[in-house]
Every structure is written in C-alpha cells, then in structure tokens.
Image (spheres, grey):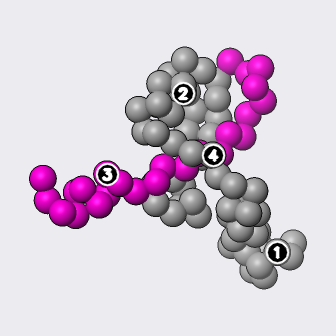
Amino acid sequence: MSEQATKFDELTRYIRVRSAPENKFVEFDFAIGHPELFVELVLPTAAFQLFCKHNNVIHMSSDQIRLVDEDMVKWRFGDKGHR
C-alpha cells in the first residue's frame, strides 16, 4: 500500500445529520478530511448505522457546522454570513 493511500485511510470522516431521529431515512452530510467539502447522502437507518461504523465517523462540532453554514451563505448570497 502506498504512503498516500495510507494517509487517505487515516483522514477523519465527518457526518452531520440533517433529518429528524424518527424519520425512516437518515439525511446527512459526509466529509473526508475537510468538513466543508461534503456530499449529501440519504440511507435507511440500519444502513446509516453500518455506514457510520464502517467509516469510523465523528459528528461535526458546532464550530465546524457554523463555519460550513457561513460558507454556504457566502456562496449563495455573496458575503460571508449575510443574506
């Protein structure tokens, strides 16, 4: 295995759940290494739990979530943190 592959495998995997706990499907953001670079995914609850276990995920911190949200506003409206 190359050194680069090992480093990738060691990158932190982040999730941010966006759906309500009682929903049949879990809507969430998934990022590898950089919380601000994420994909939006949807999985049934059991598959989501397996996905999290397999990827050894951690939940984004409130500070990370705030920064991601501010960045999204900046891209949508032009100024960071202003609509």
Q: Earlier along the polypeptide chain: callout 2 or callout 4?
A: 2
Circle 3 sits on which residue?
Answer: 9
How would you rate the neighbour count of disc 3 (Cα within 10 Å): few for under 14, some for 14-19, many for 20 or more? few
How would you rate the neighbour count of disc 4 (Cα within 10 Å): few for under 14, some for 14-19, many for 20 or more? some
Q: Which mark is residue 52?
A: none
Viewer-nearest of labels 2 and 4? 4
Disc 1/disc 2 C-alpha distance (Å): 31 Å
Q: Secondary structure at mark 3?
A: helix
Disc 3/disc 2 C-alpha distance (Å): 20 Å
Number of dots carrying numbers: 4
Q: Earlier along the polypeptide chain: callout 3 or callout 4?
A: 3
In the visual, does 7 lie left or right of 47?
Answer: left
- Depicted 47 relative to depicted 61: above or below: above
Three-letter code for the amino acid on which mark 2 is drawn:
Phe
7 or 27, which is in the foreground? 7
Viewer-nearest of labels 3 and 2? 3
Viewer-nearest of labels 4 and 1? 4
Instruction: Determine the residue located farthest toward the right in the rendered image.
Output: 83
Circle 2 sits on which residue?
Answer: 48
Is residue 13 a member of the stretch shown in magenta?
yes
Three-letter code for the amino acid on which mark 4 is drawn:
His
Task: Please give the range of residues in magenta.
Answer: 1-24
Q: Secondary structure at mark 1?
A: loop
Q: Earlier along the polypeptide chain: callout 3 or callout 1?
A: 3
Circle 1 sits on which residue?
Answer: 81
Using the rendered view, name the quadrant where residue 16 is placed. Answer: top right
In the visual, does 47 lie left or right of 81?
Answer: left
- The residue located at (55%, 17%) in the rendering is 46
Three-letter code for the amino acid on which mark 3 is drawn:
Asp
Q: Which mark is residue 59?
A: 4
In the visual, does 63 lie left or right of 13?
Answer: right
In the visual, does 62 lie left or right of 35?
Answer: right
